[in-house]
Image (spheres, grey):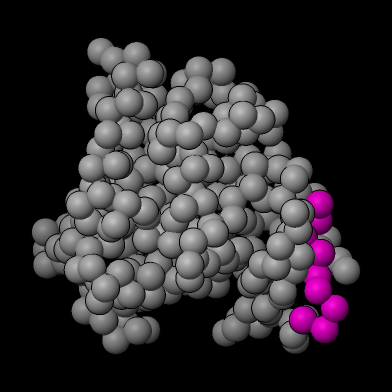
Amino acid sequence: MPSSTNVLVHTDKLSLAATLCDSVVKSSKAAMEARRSFTLALSGGSIPKMLSLDNMIAAFARQNIEPSFENWHVFLADERIVPPTSPDSNMLALQTDGFLSPPASSNIKPPTSYPIVDSTSNTPSEVSTAYEEEVKSVLGSKSAGVFDCVVCGMGEDGHTCSLFPGHALVTIPSTNHVDFITDSPKQPPERITLTFNVLNSSRGVIFAAAGAGKSDVLKAVFKKVDGSEEGPATASAPQSLVCSKDDSQFPCAMVSPSGDGASLLWLVDVAAAASISR
C-alpha cells in the first residue's frame, strides 16, 4: 500500500553525508537518554565513507555533544561472507573509512562493533545463525528487542542490504532477524543480511542514495504529494519533499518501520531525485 515518506533532497553527496551523520547522532542522543545505549546497523557501499570519523565529529559538534561512541553497539546490516581482510568486507570498510576505529590519540571512545564469525570454517547457514544469536542477544539486553537506527543504502536495481529483487528472501520474507543467501546477483555470492522482519520493527531507518543511477528506481517508488514541495535545495539546507511511496516494486521500498513513533527518512541528492514527479 502507498505510504507517506519524507524525502530530503541535497545539492551534493557532501551535504547528504552531513545530514546522515546529524541524523545518526540525533538518534543516538534519544537512545542514550532513554536506555543508556544505542543500537545501530550499517550497510556498506558508500555508507562507510559518508560516516567517516571526521564527518561524525563534525555532527557531534553541530549538536554541542562531546564526541563519544561509548555504549554504541554497531552491527552490520549485511555482510559478504568473506575473510575479514577481504576488500569486499563491509566491516573492513566501516573500520577503515567509517568511525568504528578512532585512533587512540583522539581520546574518542570507540563503539562496540560486531563482525561475522570466521567464514573460512563456517557455512553460510552457520555464519547467519551465529550473527542472529548475537543480534537478538544484544537487542534484547540493550534495546528492548529492536534496533534504534538502521542506515541502508540502495542499489540501482532497488536492492537494499542483501535483499535483491525477485530473490526468495524478498518474495517469501524470512521470519528470522538475520538470514543468508548463496546466490547473490552481485559478487560475492554468499552473504548475510538483516531481514524485513527486523528492519520494519526498528525505531528508525535512514536511506542514503546518491547519483543519477538511482533516479529510475526513485521515480518508480516516489511521487510528490501536491503542495508539499518547498524551495530548491541549497548548500546549507536540503529540499524537503513529502512523497507517497509505492511499497510493491522494489526491496528498498518494502522497508517501512511500523512501530509506535518509528521513523523512515530518505536522504538523496539532486541527481538521484531528478525524476521524482507528481
86 on left or right of 1: left
* Magenta region, residue range: 219-228
Q: Looking at the image, can residue 271 be seen?
A: no
Q: Residue at coordinates 25% horizontally, 49% vertically from top-left?
A: 140
- Find out whether residue 221 is within the magenta segment: yes
Residue 89 picture quarter: top left
Q: Viewer-proximal residue, 192 or 236? A: 192
Tell me the quadrant of the picture where the N terminus can be found: bottom right
The residue lying at 76 percent from left, 58 percent from top is 2
Look at the image and tell me in which quarter the C terminus lies. Answer: bottom right
The location of residue 130, given as percent across then percent down, is: 27, 28
Residue sitting nearer the eye, 140 or 207 = 140
The answer to whether 233 is drawn above or below residue 179 in the figure is below
Q: In the image, residue 82 lies at what x, y percent?
A: 37, 23
Task: Farthest residue to the right: give it.
Answer: 278
* Residue 12 highlighted magenta (yes or no): no
Residue drawn at (31%, 82%) of the image:
61
Using the rendered image of the protein, determine whether residue 266 is visible from the camera's viewpoint: yes
Q: Could you say where residue 254 lies in the image, as x and y percent from the top left?
A: 64, 47
Which x, y percent locates residue 211? 68, 55
Give the quarter of the image for residue 7: bottom right
> In the picture shown, does residue 2 fall above or below 36?
above
The answer to whether residue 67 is above or below residue 157 is below
In the image, taking residue 22 as reference, residue 72 lies left or right, namely: left
Quadrant in the rendering for residue 219: bottom right
- Residue at point 32%, 26% (across, down): 129
The total number of labels drawn is 0
Q: Nearer the viewer, residue 67 or 106?
A: 67
**Residue 211 or residue 43, whichever sits in front:** 43
